[in-house]
Structures are given as C-alpha cells and as structure tokens.
Image (tube, grey):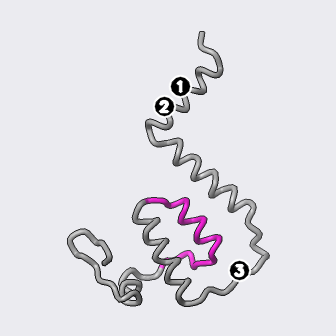
Amino acid sequence: MATVAELKAVLKDTLEKRGVLGHLKARIRAEVFNALDDESEPRPSLSHENFLINELIREYLEFNKYKYTASVLIAESGQPVVPLDRQFLIHELNAFEDSKDNTIR
C-alpha cells in the first residue's frame, strides 16, 4: 500500500503535468488577495500615463489568459473592471494592429 507521502507526490505530479496545479495556485492567490483587500481604503488616483500602462499590462495578461493575475491587477490598481476599447488603446499609444494576427506594434 502506498504511503501518504507517495500519494501526495503522485497527485502533485499529475496535477502539474495536466497544467492544473499552476491554475489552482493562481486562483488561490487571487482569492486570498480579494479576501484581504480593504475596500474601505481609497485607491490613489491614477495619472493618465499610469492608467494607460495598466491597460496595456491588462491587455497582455488577458491575451495570454492570465485571468487571475489580471483580476489582482484590476483590484489592486483601481482600474475599471471594464477594459478600454482596444482601438482606443492603440490610438492613445500611437501603435497599429497587425490584422493577420491581432498583434499591436
């Protein structure tokens, strides 16, 4: 019969191979942050530049499907829950979008 330590090791290995362990850790971090976040404490106001930088970071996180990391960024930075329109962001950054793969240059 397998020991508890062996079962833990096999379970951890299986979850890592399936990509579930990282997802669970990110979800736990996000939930812990949300539970500890003091919503009564006002957020500092963001400058226009920092607002755009945060939106660009959010775009990157959501593009790469780091949704829990993005949720922590939104909560911690005070960004609006609804993201800026992508075309507006491209215009503000004087960038352009490559239509074949939707990348911003």
Q: Position of residue 2 (x, y in %)?
A: 59, 14
Per the image, the residue denoted by label 2 is: 14
Element assignment for label 2: helix
- Relative to 105, residue 14 above or below: above
Ranked by sequence position, the earlier of labels 3 and 1 is 1
Q: Amino acid at mark 3?
A: Arg
Give, as a single range, the part of the protein colored magenta. Answer: 65-83
Q: Going 52% across and 46% down the picture, which residue do you hit?
A: 22
Q: Is residue 68 magenta?
A: yes
The residue at 73%/66% (across/down) is 37
Residue in the image at 58% along x and 78% along y: 79
User: Which quarter of the figure is the C terminus placed in?
Assistant: bottom left
Cα separation, mark 3 vs mark 1, equals: 44 Å
Q: Estimate the x, y position of residue 92 in percent, counting from the top left.
A: 41, 89
Q: Residues within 10 Å of mark 2 (few under 14, many from 20)?
A: few
Q: Amino acid at mark 2?
A: Thr
Which quadrant, please, contains the N terminus?
top right
Seen in the picture, residue 34 relative to 15 is either above or below; the reply is below
The Cα–Cα distance between marks 2 and 3, rounded to whole angstroms, is: 41 Å
**Dot 3, how many residues are within 10 Å of its Cα: few (below 14), some (14-19), or many (20+)?**
few
Residue 12 in which image quadrant:
top right
Instruction: In the rendered structure, find residue 43 and report the number of the disc placed on it.
Output: 3
Q: What residue is pinned by disc 1?
A: 10
Q: For this view, does 101 lie left or right of residue 68?
A: left
Picture quadrant where residue 3 is located: top right
- The kind of secondary structure element at disc 3 is loop
Left/right placement of residue 87 relative to residue 99 reads right
Image quarter of residue 103:
bottom left
Do the residues under discs 1 and 2 have CB atoms within 8 angstroms? yes
**Amino acid type at image mark 1:** Val
Most extreme residue toward the top is 1
Using the numbered discs, state the Cα–Cα distance from disc 1 to disc 2 in whole angstroms. 6 Å
